[in-house]
Amino acid sequence: TPVQVKKIACIGAGYVGGPTCSMIAHKCPHIQVTIVDVNADRINAWNSDTLPIYEPGLEEIVKACRGKNLFFDTDIDKAIVEADLIFVSVNTPTKKSGVGAGYAADLFYVELCTRRIASVATSSKIVVEKSTVPCRTAQSMRTILEANSRPGLRFDILSNPEFLAEGTAINDLAHPDRVLIGSLGTPEGRAAQASLVDVYANWVPREKCITTGLWSSELTKLAANAILAQRISSINALSAICEVTGADVDEVAYACGLDSRIGPKFLKSSVGFGGSCFQKDILNLVYLSESLHLPEVADYWRQVITMNEYQKRRFAQTVVSSMFNTITNKKLAVLGFAFKKDTGDTRETPSATVCRFFRQESAKISVYDPKVPEKQIFLDLTEPGVVDDSEQVKKQVTVCKSAMEACTGAEGICVLTEWDEFKTLDWSAIYASMAKPAMVFDGRGILDADKLREIGFKVFSIGKGV
Ligand code: NAD
Ligand code: UGA
């Protein structure tokens, strides 16, 4: 019979653990939720007025529940001992060295938490994989738990991947398209699955709680991200054709998207996709395919990444060629550094790739982003391992407090994140301040190019020919 969950621990207070478990606390006042992390600074920030991540609507939820049924703590062992159900929501980055370097997911942190749970638990637990992991990771977790725990304890492992997107996390969590819970199909596994369904059923309609086997659930997470990213690479591949032929990528995407079999979402052409997961999860899928001796399958998914790299490079090259083949010592304004709007996250942001390209061409870059701190921008633009590079970055890159400041006196402006405020800037005033010919490169397709041309700008938009 399903256990009624009264106390939840979440290991990992990051972009996923924080918002997800705050939402559970918000929707389930009868459940005590404790989110723990090894990073004390992060926990302190969760307990402060300035949360460690920016996400619209998050602060309201955290402030309403914090200290009541929602706690942020560094005492991992205590949280494990007390909980009936534990989410493992730690990072699973791409491995940097060793077998599978550059492709495989690094399961070091997942294994560390699993061993911690095994060694400190004094009662049976439901252990939930929330992190994105390679197919069959739950098997390894089960083996570790069973081999290292006190006799007589039961550990039921569930896979419950997270599908939230940054910038819309709170809405995605409040109204998910589906909640996916995988279990071993045993009676005990199904009972654990039912316990977790009961938690979500406090706000998610039961028919949206999909229950599957463990391996399907694990693979679905990689598959969903791969398919989403593939749509972006598909439209970006078409954008290159549009620029040469004079077709308009937005018109093509709109007309294709009206076919109900295709659908309109995730067909917005851009300077390339970023974010912590698309690339990582596809590489993970590529590695899985290769490990299973399926090289054609691996090549198929790898191409999604290859196209994305091409798109970023192609954009940067267009800027250089439009500016008479040299940007040496020219001032370029970069509007937007986050990987998408409404987040301060810069992981794998295309903006950093484009800025690095501009650095190599010796441009002067002035960056403005409404949410990314100056320190983070410098960190992302410094080449690791290059001596004195941070000094060089400071000579080439200025971080500005407003879009106007970044654009004043520039020869070219690149829009690299689709922040709404960029649509309503005083473009006439910007034009007046710029060196001529004043150029705008819209890497997100958000500006009214006709209006800008009326003002006098030369405009390049992704996927639009001249
Ligand atoms: P993150 O880096 O923001 O957070 C992970 C946290 O885990 C860090 O604060 C880290 O200090 C902590 N941690 C690591 N090892 C620990 C340990 N042994 N004990 C306690 N704490 C530990 O990562 P994230 O973006 O929240 O992603 C977490 C997982 O969720 C990843 O597997 C990711 O693929 C997946 N995911 C992320 C997103 C997203 O939008 N970011 C969406 C869906 C799924
Ligand atoms: C993505 C998925 O959308 C989530 O479902 C998933 O949970 C998450 O990855 C994850 O596993 O981490 P996220 O990366 O936060 O979420 O944001 P997206 O909205 O998917 O955007 C990713 C990137 O693609 C951004 O750089 C965005 O600008 C770009 N994008 C998105 C496009 O270029 N075109 C589009 O049409 C959509």
Image (cartoon, rainbow, N blue to C red):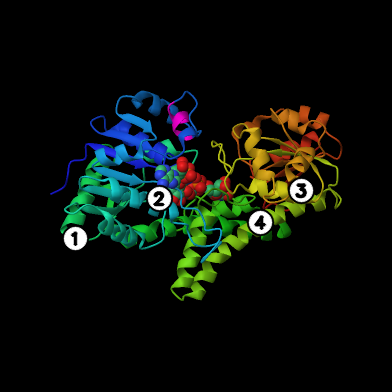
Q: Is residue 263 left or right of residue 135?
A: right
Which residue is pictured at 86% across the width and 35% down the height? 435
Please state which amino acid type lies under the numbered disc 2.
Ser
Please state which amino acid type lies under the numbered disc 3.
Phe
Give the residues in magenta: 42-47
| Chain-order first, disc 2 or disc 3 | 2
Q: Which residue is mark 4?
A: 311
Q: In the figure, 262 relative to 61: above or below? A: below
Q: Sort mark 2 into few (<14), some (14-19) or many (20+) by Cα contacts within 10 Å.
A: many
Splitting the image into 4 quarters, where does residue 206 fall? top left
Mark 2 vs mark 3: give the one in front.
2
Horizontal and vertical percent for residue 111?
38, 54
Q: What's the CA distance linking mark 3 and mark 1?
A: 56 Å
Q: Which residue is mark 3?
A: 358
Q: Which residue is mark 1?
A: 186
Indicate yes or no whether the magenta region holds residue 144. no
Q: What's the CA distance linking mark 4 and mark 3?
A: 15 Å
In this view, the residue in front, 273 or 231, is 273
Q: Is residue 383 visible?
A: yes
Horizontal and vertical percent for residue 147?
27, 59
Q: What's the CA distance linking mark 4 and mark 2?
A: 29 Å
